[in-house]
Structure formats: structure tokens, C-alpha cells
Amino acid sequence: MNSPITGKPMTLRKEERILTFRKEEFSVVYHFYSCDDSKENFTDSELDQKNLLQVYNQYRAKHNIPFPDEIKSLRSKYGISAVKMSEILGFGVNGYRNYENGEVPNASNGKLIQLAKDSKKFYELVKLSDCLKEDSKEKLLGKLEGLIEKEEENAFSFELENYLLDSSLPDEYSGFKKPDLGKLTEMVVFFSERLNPWKTQMNKLLFYADFYMYKKRCSSISGVRYRAINMGPVVNNYNSVYDYIANNDDIDIWQHDFGGEEFKSRPGRSCHLTLFDELEQEVLEHVSEKFKNIATKDNSTKKIIDISHGEKAWKENEKERNIISYKYAFDLIGV
């Protein structure tokens, strides 16, 4: 960006700042352009969005308010329009649609949406609603009864996913995204198809994809938590996660005589790229291109470990083997 004062290119900088939203203060990594000649600072719409999203994310996490992707998936789960969802929950006609598009609900509406995520509780809300015609209400209640029954049958699968990915509420350690085993699986398939990485390499590829995504949009792709260990950042509970994905026949993990484990794609099993939006696909392709030459060379695992050891995210967390905050994404140097 050029300075509106001198016309010369400006320097992109970042610093810790406190921003206020709804009378509450939040610490963010504030991004801005600095004009070296005039000493004036400027932002553009992209940086404004990045700065504000950090505030909104923290506000949502603090008040247990669902994120836009959760709000969208909720309505998709029940198969009803945004207008009808608004009416059932008692919002304005366009309220639910606005929340899907990123508007932050107030605390009371946020709690109501959280309540509606429970199919049994949403069933009761529909029963109490007087905005639906009787035949439409009966049809929706019947659908919800079937959904509740199916969820009860699949309770073990939900519990297993929670165990594998620590599916607690979105926070700074999940990239303000609810952990999504489906997306993580497709990321693993994606990198297995393109690079046949070793297990240590896979951990770094996933780390860079999720953290680079956060650097661009202040939310991760998979919602996975990463831990700093001596070998660099790794998916938390990675051995169990990878074994689960392999046991589901989504990938093959080849055990080599010298002890290494290589990830390979399965015949007929390609990555379902439609699960990712356009920017997420761009990030995956970027990370794949960045590391494809390293992954095919001798000592490739050591090289990718060395790259990850240059990250502030690893340096400041390895000693205590901490879960890594996604705030370190703004300091990435490896991609």
C-alpha cells in the first residue's frame, strides 16, 4: 500500500493493542501500514477486517456465542430457511441470516442459538413456536424426532471424536473454530495424495495449513489443537488421530523397516475438496507447493523440522510442551 501523503510504499507493521467492543476490552495483534516519512499510520479494509475479527472471536469465545460456520451448519442440520429459523428463535426476519454472514449476536441471542444446537431442546422450541403452520410444524417435529433418534444411535461416534480432538468450545487454541474431524481427515488425504509424507512431515504440513489460514482469516481450517514437542509442532493426540483415519480406510500408513511411517493415498479415495471453501483450498495448495521439493529430498524430515524450529510458535512453547495459541500465526516465517 502506498502512502496517501507521499505516494511511497509503506511498511506493514503489527503490535499488541487493546480494542473495545460492546464496552469490553480485548488484546489483539493490530496490523497497520506505517508511512516512514510522515510517521502516520494507515489501514485498509483487509487489515480492518483482520483487526476486528480478532476482537469478535474473543467476544464470541468469552460469551459462548457460536461462530458463523456453526450458525450456518445448524440451519443446514435442521433443513429450514433462515427466515423460519429467525422466527422460531424470535429474532428479526433477517436476524439469523445476518448472524450467518458474520454479524455478532448479542449475548442473549447467542445463548439461544447455542441452546438450539441441541436437537432435543430445539424440538421443544419448535413446539412452543406459533410462527409455523400446523402441518409445517408437524412435519418439522417429525424430522427432528428422526434426527434425535439417529444422534442417540451415533452417540459413541460423537464421544470418540470429542476424545480425539478435544472438541470443546472454539478458542484461541483451536483457531476459534470448532474441531472438525471430517475436515482434518480430508486435509490428511490431500497431503497424502500430493506428497506421501512421513508422519513427522504430516504434522508440520497440517500445522502450517491451519496456522497460515488463521493468518489470512483469523480462523483455522480444522479447529485442531497443536502441541509443541522436541520434533516441532504436532497435532495434539496425533497417533490416535492418524490411527483412526487409517482404520477408516481414508489413507494407508506404511510401516518401514527402519521405523518410519509413510502416509499414502488409497486407490479410489481422493480428497473431497468441495468440503473446503475457495480460500481454504488456496491455502492447502500453497502449503503443498511450498514443501513439495523438501518432501522429496534426502533428509527431508530433518529439513522440515528445522523450518518449524524457526517458528516463534515452537520456540516459546516447546520447553513446557504447551498447546500453541493461534496468535503465533501472525509471526509465521515458514510459509
Image (cartoon, rainbow, N blue to C red):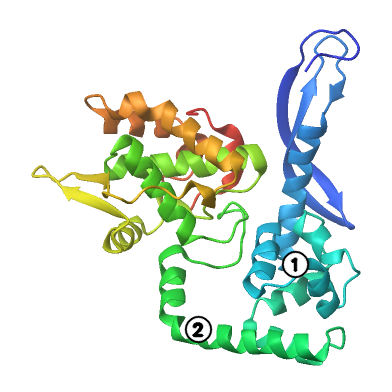
Q: Which residue is mark 2?
A: 150
Is 319 or 82 nearer to us in this picture? 82
Q: What is the x, y in percent for residue 262?
A: 23, 44
Residue 8 placement, left or right of 180: right
Q: Is residue 320 visible?
A: no
Please give the residue where the numbered disc 1 appears in the rendered image. Answer: 63
Residue 8 visible in the current orientation:
yes
Three-letter residue code for mark 1 = His
Classify residue 166 as left or right of residue 248: right
Q: Residue at x 85, y 76 (%)?
A: 87
Q: Quadrant of residue 138?
A: bottom right
Above or below, 285 against 274 in this view is above
Question: Considering the image in quadrants, where does the N terminus appear?
Answer: top right
Mark 1 is surrounded, within 10 Å at the Cα level, by few (under 14), some (14 to 19) or many (20 or more) other residues, namely: few
Is disc 1 placed on a helix, strand or loop?
A: helix
Residue 302 percent coordinates (x, y): 28, 31
**Residue 191 spot, x, y in % from top left:** 37, 41
Identified by mark 2, the residue type is: Lys
At 72% from the left and 72% from the top, the residue drawn is: 80
Q: Position of residue 172 (x, y in %)?
A: 61, 53
Image vertical order of residue 114 relative to residue 165, above or below: below
Q: Answer with mark 1 or mark 2, whichever residue precedes in sequence.
A: 1
Q: Are marks 1 and 2 in contact (CB under 8 Å)?
A: no
Q: Residue visible at 61% across and 38% down? A: 215
| Number of residues whose C-alpha sits closer than 10 Å to that of mark 2, classed few (under 14), some (14–19) or many (20 or more) | few
Image mark for residue 117: none
How far apart, in angstroms, are the residues tagged by discs 1 and 2? 30 Å
Reply above or below: 298 against 92.
above
